[in-house]
Amino acid sequence: LTPAGQILASVPGGLLPGPSVVQLLAPDGTSIPSVLMQVDPPPPGVTSVLNSSGQQIGASQPVKPGDTVTVIVAGLADANGSLPSASTIHVNVGGVDQIANTISSMGGQGYCQVQVTLPANLPNGAQTPLTVAVGTRVSSQYSINIQN
């Protein structure tokens, strides 16, 4: 138990997403009533970010604030392969949260395209962090190049 009242525990790798019954034990070994723990699927992963011409954003292909980009993401679909609605996908760019414009499947392998309009007030930067989140699942950071 942490000072914040959280319980830290290892989760077995093969555990399916969804609610799972957890049996708790007191420090002296006595049983405490079971609780339900929500197991989320792994976080999504950003594999690339493309400009409006379909070119990967990089040092020679920066984007401007206000541009619409396509983010290629793995792992946004649920256990049944259904994609979330665009309104539930949050793309954070340089600390500014944006809602996705659209989402579409790339046909198999769990990849999809998420289109988002970049915030208009982004400063220049070659390592501007971008993350994609749905619910409590947040991708690791992917860096893009912003140039006014």
Image (cartoon, rainbow, N blue to C red):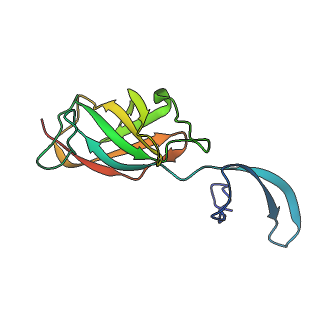
| Residue ID at (62%, 64%) | 13
The extreme front residue here reads 107
Q: Quadrant of the N terminus?
A: bottom right
Judge left or right: residue 128 versus residue 113.
left
| Residue ID at (65%, 66%) | 10
Q: How many marks?
A: 0
For residue 67, which quarter of the picture?
top left
Q: Is residue 67 or residue 93 the one in the foreground?
A: 67
Q: Is residue 129 above or below residue 6?
A: above
Judge left or right: residue 83 versus residue 12.
left
Q: Is residue 146 or residue 15 the one in the foreground?
A: 15
Q: Residue 30, how many percent across, how many down?
A: 88, 68
Q: Residue 125, how many percent across, how many down?
A: 18, 46
Q: Is residue 138 above or below residue 119?
A: below
For residue 51, which quarter of the picture?
top left
Judge left or right: residue 91 versus residue 21.
left
Q: Residue 117, how many percent across, how many down?
A: 30, 29
Q: Is residue 11 or residue 16 the one in the foreground?
A: 16
Q: Residue 23, how many percent across, how many down?
A: 81, 60
| Residue ID at (27%, 34%) | 69
| Residue ID at (37%, 39%) | 92
Q: Quadrant of the C terminus?
A: top left
